[in-house]
Image (tube, grey):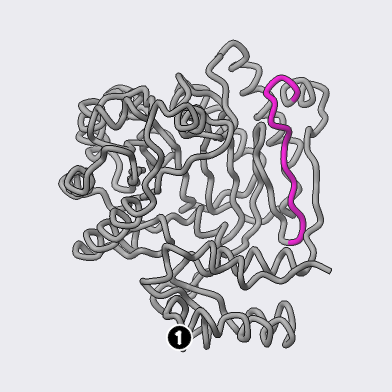
Amino acid sequence: MYIYGIIKYILAGIYLHIPFCKQACYYCDFHFSTSLKRKEEMITAIKRELVLRKDELNKEQIETIYFGGGTPSLLKIDELKMLIDTIFENYDVADDAEITIEANPDDLTSKKIKELSKLPINRLSIGIQSFFDDNLKFMNRAHTAEESKKCLAEATQYFKNITIDLIYGVPNMSNDKWLSNLQQAFDFNIPHISGYALTVEEKTVLHKLIEKGKVPPVDENLALEQYHILVSETEKRGFVNYEISNFGNPAYFSKHNTSYWFGEKYLGIGPSAHSFNGFERSWNVSNNSKYINALLGDELPSEKEQLSEANRFNEYIMTGLRTIWGVSFQKIEKEFGAMYLQDLKKSAEHHIKSGLLEIELRAFSGKVLITTKKGKFLADGISSDLFKISS
């Protein structure tokens, strides 16, 4: 991994999907259930999957473990400990492994934070989203603004490595309110912020509410304004916008997410979780009952897809242009060949002339293609223009 000229190799990771939430956020299209009836069976099944798949990464050392969801903070401490112990018993975990848990403020009581700090977990990802109750109500979040402030005041006493999620582009969230949200994060000395534009996914409650005219549609111009505010305000305070949605002190970049962007191997454990071994993707069934029943019979409820050369190229373009490390010409030529590099340069010409892309010469990686400040918010669309069409 290239961070300011320093090369660091990121090893394999494990992602655990905990598919439970107290209530459904209106914008969310992830796999989850608000029923906890089969929670104990689910944990047993996840534990079983971890054991069954322990050799898939060829005994590579595990450098990152990530509890996502859903809402992993709904699990009891002994349940989390059991899953962590299972990983340590069956995998070679690095001594300095980054171990993250996603958590909601309403779960992070003083007692829960203290208990979490006694586990190997060393990074909290807290779903704040906004410090304003009207925004939280609009999103149907389970916590209040006061709970957010209270949990951060407590969490910062026990954890140094904390990231918070904030959402911008929310209808009726003015630029002043967005600035206030950011200031709250700065006041708590949070070293990492993930800022996401509110998006309307099909089959979500938000999509239905907008269709029925009950809430206003998302204003893309407002979202763009607030993204620029996010970039400007974090930059003033020494944060690095190392990926479109991620801003952090260099010592607190997310190792786990960065491994995704660098195409490292990872296991996805739990219903709907995806895995990647370098050339093949697999994904588990997005159904809690089917997942549990399969694992109870020692079967893996997953499908696989062999990635074509074009697929792997496209994924590298997509992830590379979202980060400060960009797309390495050396890597393109080495892994895909001179023709791919030639086509990429030709496809990029228009965007370079438009000021959306530029080529930089880096000390360790040679020439890299990166998005400019003007082009960063448009990175996904630019990437699609550079994709290789599978034959």
Badge 1 local density, few (<14 within 10 Å), some, or many (20+)? some
Pick whichever, 316 or 378, lies toward us. Answer: 378
Please check the rendered image and state whether residue 107 is part of the magenta-colored stretch, yes or no: no
Q: Horizontal placement of 30 versus 210: left or right?
A: right
Q: Does 302 appear above or below 93? A: above
Question: How many numbered marks have been drawn onto this rendered protein structure?
Answer: 1
Q: Horizontal placement of 237 versus 22: left or right?
A: left
Disc 1 element: strand
List x then y, in percent, for residue 268.
65, 43
List x then y, in percent, for residue 218.
39, 43
Please check the rendered image and state whether residue 289 is part of the magenta-colored stretch, yes or no: yes
Q: Residue at x 78, y 60 (%)?
A: 307
Q: Horizontal placement of 47 versus 97: left or right?
A: right
Q: Residue at x 56, y 63 (%)?
A: 319
Quadrant housing residue 170: top left
Tell me where the magenta segment starts and ends, as one range: 279-290
Q: Residue at x 56, y 35 (%)?
A: 30
Residue where numbered disc 1 is placed: 360
> From where the camera sits, is residue 347 visible?
yes
Quadrant housing residue 172: top left
List x then y, in percent, for residue 31.
60, 31
Looking at the rendered structure, the kind of residue marked 1 is: Glu
Q: Residue at x 21, y 29 (%)?
A: 150
Pick whichever, 24 or 2, lies toward us. Answer: 24
Q: Does 19 appear above or below 361? A: above
